């Protein structure tokens, strides 16, 4: 088990600086997520660690061992791909055994470890099936088992859930997190979905234009965004003259503690989403403020109603 | 200083270097020899353009240029006119027996066209069976020799080049585009002309250009049918064989001109057609149109008539090979004498054909598949250059490449003339573009993440190539192998330049029998060739079906 150290990693494609001088330390056993919009460099950085992308400058170490100069197949990494990359010419068991055979594991030891890995991803008994007989979720489980079974130093996930439907995504991400924690393998996870990132990660690195925008625990980045980009990427944000304000920091003035600053306006739009109700309020100066309240049956808000909001001054974040 | 190559690119770099080496030595160097032969004097010493002036000032050779081009254009037009309605009928009309029609329509691609030409002579030529029969009842018709007969044979043998891509294009048309046109008030007929045909036009033109290039390079058909009419590929061969000076300058001039014409056409294709590809996001093939009984019957008759007509000459050859010939004259009695004459003297030509085709098909696979891997997986200027060079043999007539080989490898450090390997090498180089094209098509279907998964699991790039890519490509590689094998077995244009002594092939036997007027021997050789061609195709077909059912 190993921590990962990235120092000054850089890569240019043509005129685009895909990764522009990234320094990063990932702790032993940590679940670390690279988050950002498409083209921010998160996948390139992951592929640098995997060995599929050369560094123009900088270095990457697993613990004290420098690995960016090693060929990809000697780096001892388990990687899970966006489109599963399950070998269609091998059975489920054949896929899981692939990396073990490359490591000269054979016989009873091989069979035992393949079975254990399949049980771990809840595919016990699926060994003889062919990939084309499996669903997308099952294929991704095969890919995860295949990556885990070699007991790699590092696990890499390249948007592993983006091809699955919404419900499966939510249950799989919890499973991935649980597996990683129980095995204690250092993991780097790439996604563009901030909710997914927040749900699985110990820490998140938010990236933009090849650079790290902010690194921190999910709650820290959400509550204390270091920049306007970070504030907006992590969730709906009201950019007010006095700072950034999350929708849930607002309440109806009537329901708020006394002493919270007030904002007055007209209801422009109401969305009832079940547990929460989202309300857009047009202020006197024409600007829109987005608020979100927990559902309250007695409350009635209609478009055009005059409304007074109040916000928690402690949750205003000043942006540079 | 050491040359530093990123480790994940070492395999492509090594393959690419070997590819450049092979194509440089066995393609570019012979072509350069043809070029230098054309600009040196008869002794091969002084630089001169006099050869070009000499050739182009003779009306005979200027006529060869015009004849070749005019016949090519005419055959391309007739092929398109015949194939587009056929493609439309097979893609969109309710024609019974489609699978059979399509299978039959693909056959002329692998059957040797000069056999078809020879059959036409036996049926409709001066002493042909039909000619004599019709003359006996007082009906005469024009000569089958010359441009008319050549265009007829080209149309009947090359039409699949237009049919198959056009049919695929008709099937790939997104039907919602047609529906949009009709909802805007366009009649079905107008929609066909203003929407559907423009969408498939690039496919039609791409196929047409293939036909045109094939006609430029074809040696066998004009050799059988042209008689006194000068045709480029034939005249290049005659000049080369008849050349007495040490340097074959005149043949070199014709060779260079032929390459230039074909390259020009290829260039036009790459420039214009690659940009005019209309991606239609069709999720499923458009539905079969509902048409009246009259149109349905007409379409059915037309489809069957075309595919059967194209195969009649081959069928006729097989029948005729079991009849008695006295010299070139046919007598309608059953006889095995032709085959006895063919195999009594020696089984050697048949064995040579099988051996050369097998060796060359192995060579083509070993060269073509790795090059396709580099071309599809590496984005760099060198990879593109390799792609262009690997496509180049397509623009080089077999006759010309063979002349280049003879000039390049008849002296010096590498002598190949007179042996069997020169033929195997020329066949290999000629078919490399097909292997690269077909392998690239398969590789584009294989997600590169599969290779990365294998590498991250601990297999080196080379092991990954062998353990993941080769198994996944196997079906495609196998069918490519059989198709190459079959087309090499009936190769004529390079073979007639290169064969020597004991290394004669079946096509050479047929060629010599044609020259010497031995009709019986020629038909027996042609029949054997047809069987040698069709048996592997049938086996492949069965094997692939079992493979698909098993998977």
Image (cartoon, coloured by chain):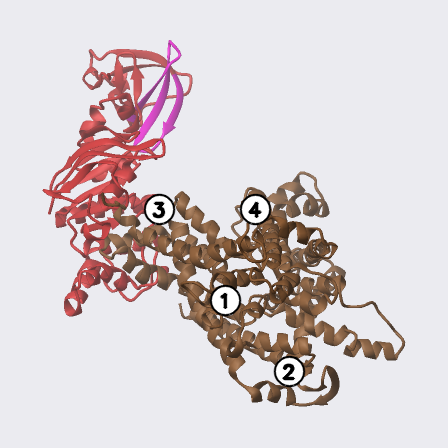
Chain colours: A red, B brown
How far across and down, in percent of the image, does residue B56 sit?
68, 51
* Tags 3 and 4 both on a single chain: no
Residue that carries the numbered disc 2 in the rendered image: B521
In the picture, the quarter occupied by the C terminus of chain B is bottom left
Is B397 one of the magenta-colored residues?
no
Q: Tag 3, which secondary structure?
A: loop
Residue A163: numbered disc? 3
Q: According to the image, label 4 marks what residue?
A: B267
Mark before the other along the chain sequence, 1 or 4: 4
The residue depicted at 24 percent of the width and 61 percent of the height is A98
**In this view of the protein, can residue A12 be seen by the observer?**
yes
Q: Is residue B100 left or right of residue A318?
A: right
Numbered disc in front, either 2 or 4: 2
Circle 3 chain: A
Marks 3 and 2: which is nearer the front?
2
Does the magenta-highlighted stretch encompass residue A289? yes
Chain under callout 4: B
Examine the rendered structure and indicate whether residue A205 appears above or below residue A172. Answer: above
In x, y percent, where is residue A237?
30, 23
What stretch of residues is rendered in magenta? A267-293
């Amino acid at each position: 088990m190993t921590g990962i150290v990235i120092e000054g990693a850089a890569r240019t494609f043509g005129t685009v600086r895909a990764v522009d001088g990234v320094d990063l330390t990932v702790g032993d056993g940590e679940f670390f997520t690279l988050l950002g919009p498409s083209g921010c460099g998160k996948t390139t950085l992951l592929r640098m660690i995997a060995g599929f992308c050369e560094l123009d400058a900088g270095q990457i170490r697993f613990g004290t061992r420098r690995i960016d100069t090693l060929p990809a197949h000697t780096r001892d990494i388990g990687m899970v791909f966006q489109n599963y990359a399950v070998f269609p010419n091998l059975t489920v068991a054949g896929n899981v055994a692939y990396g073990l055979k490359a490591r000269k594991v054979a016989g009873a030891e091989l069979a035992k470890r393949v079975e254990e890995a399949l049980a771990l991803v809840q595919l016990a008994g699926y060994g003889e099936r062919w990939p084309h007989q499996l669903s997308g979720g099952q294929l991704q489980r095969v890919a995860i088992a295949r990556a885990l079974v070699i007991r790699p130093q590092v696990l890499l996930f390249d948007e592993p859930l983006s091809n699955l439907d919404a419900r499966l995504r939510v249950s799989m991400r919890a499973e991935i997190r649980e597996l990683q924690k129980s095995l204690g393998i250092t993991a780097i996870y790439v996604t563009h979905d901030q909710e997914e990132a927040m749900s699985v990660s110990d820490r998140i690195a938010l990236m933009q234009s090849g650079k790290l925008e902010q690194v921190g625990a999910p709650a820290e980045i959400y509550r204390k965004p270091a920049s306007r980009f970070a504030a907006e990427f992590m969730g709906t944000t009201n950019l007010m003259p006095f700072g950034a304000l999350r929708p849930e920091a607002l309440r109806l003035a009537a329901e708020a503690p006394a002493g919270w600053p007030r904002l007055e306006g007209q209801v422009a739009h109401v969305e009832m989403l079940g547990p929460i109700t989202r309300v857009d309020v047009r202020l006197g100066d024409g600007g829109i403020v987005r608020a979100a309240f927990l559902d309250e049956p007695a409350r009635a808000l209609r478009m055009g109603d005059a409304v007074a909001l109040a916000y928690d001054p402690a949750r205003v974040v000043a942006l540079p | 200083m050491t040359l530093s190559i990123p480790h994940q690119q070492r395999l492509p770099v090594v393959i690419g270097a070997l590819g450049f080496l092979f194509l440089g030595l066995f393609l570019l160097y012979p072509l350069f020899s043809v070029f230098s032969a054309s600009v040196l004097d008869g002794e091969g010493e002084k630089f001169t353009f006099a050869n070009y002036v000499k050739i182009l000032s003779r009306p005979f050779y200027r006529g060869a240029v015009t004849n070749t081009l005019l016949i090519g254009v005419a055959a391309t037009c007739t092929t398109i006119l015949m194939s587009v309605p056929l493609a439309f009928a097979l893609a969109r009309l309710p024609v019974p027996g489609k699978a059979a029609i399509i299978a039959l329509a693909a056959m002329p691609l692998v059957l040797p066209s000069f056999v078809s030409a020879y059959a036409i002579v036996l049926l409709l030529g001066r002493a042909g069976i039909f000619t004599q029969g019709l003359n006996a009842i007082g009906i005469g018709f024009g000569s089958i020799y010359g441009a008319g007969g050549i265009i007829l044979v080209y149309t009947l043998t090359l039409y699949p080049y237009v049919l198959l891509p056009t049919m695929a294009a008709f099937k790939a048309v997104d039907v919602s585009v047609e529906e949009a046109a009709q909802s805007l008030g366009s009649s079905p007929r107008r929609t066909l002309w203003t929407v559907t045909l423009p969408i498939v036009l690039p496919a039609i033109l791409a196929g047409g250009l293939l036909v045109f290039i094939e006609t430029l390079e074809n040696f066998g058909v004009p050799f059988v049918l042209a008689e006194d009419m000068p045709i480029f590929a034939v005249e290049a061969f005659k000049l080369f064989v008849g050349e007495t000076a040490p340097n074959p300058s005149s043949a070199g001039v014709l060779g260079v001109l032929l390459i230039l014409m074909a390259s020009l056409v290829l260039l036009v294709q790459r420039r214009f057609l690659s940009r005019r590809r209309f991606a239609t996001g069709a999720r499923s093939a458009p539905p079969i149109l509902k048409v009246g009984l009259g149109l349905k019957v007409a379409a059915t008759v037309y489809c069957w008539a075309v595919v059967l007509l194209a195969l009649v000459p081959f069928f006729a050859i097989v029948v005729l090979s079991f009849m008695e010939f006295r010299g070139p004259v046919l007598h309608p009695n059953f006889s095995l004498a032709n085959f006895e004459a063919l195999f009594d003297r020696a089984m050697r030509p048949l064995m040579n054909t099988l051996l050369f085709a097998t060796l060359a098909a192995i060579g083509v696979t070993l060269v073509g598949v790795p090059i396709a891997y580099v071309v599809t997986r590496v984005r760099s200027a060198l990879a593109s250059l390799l792609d262009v060079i690997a496509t180049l043999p397509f623009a080089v007539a077999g006759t010309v490449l063979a002349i280049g080989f003879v000039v390049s490898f008849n002296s010096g450090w590498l002598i190949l003339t007179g042996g069997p390997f020169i033929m195997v090498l020329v066949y290999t180089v000629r078919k490399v573009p097909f292997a690269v094209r077909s392998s690239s098509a398969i590789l584009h279907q294989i997600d590169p993440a599969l290779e990365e998964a294998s590498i991250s699991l601990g297999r080196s790039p080379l092991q990954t190539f062998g353990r993941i890519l080769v198994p996944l490509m196997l079906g495609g590689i196998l069918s490519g192998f059989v198709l190459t094998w079959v087309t090499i077995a009936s190769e004529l244009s390079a073979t007639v330049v290169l064969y020597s002594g004991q290394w004669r092939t079946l096509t050479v036997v047929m060629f010599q029998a044609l020259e010497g007027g031995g009709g019986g021997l020629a038909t027996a050789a042609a029949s054997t060739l047809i069987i040698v061609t069709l048996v592997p195709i049938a086996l492949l077909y069965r094997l692939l079906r079992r493979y698909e059912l098993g998977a």
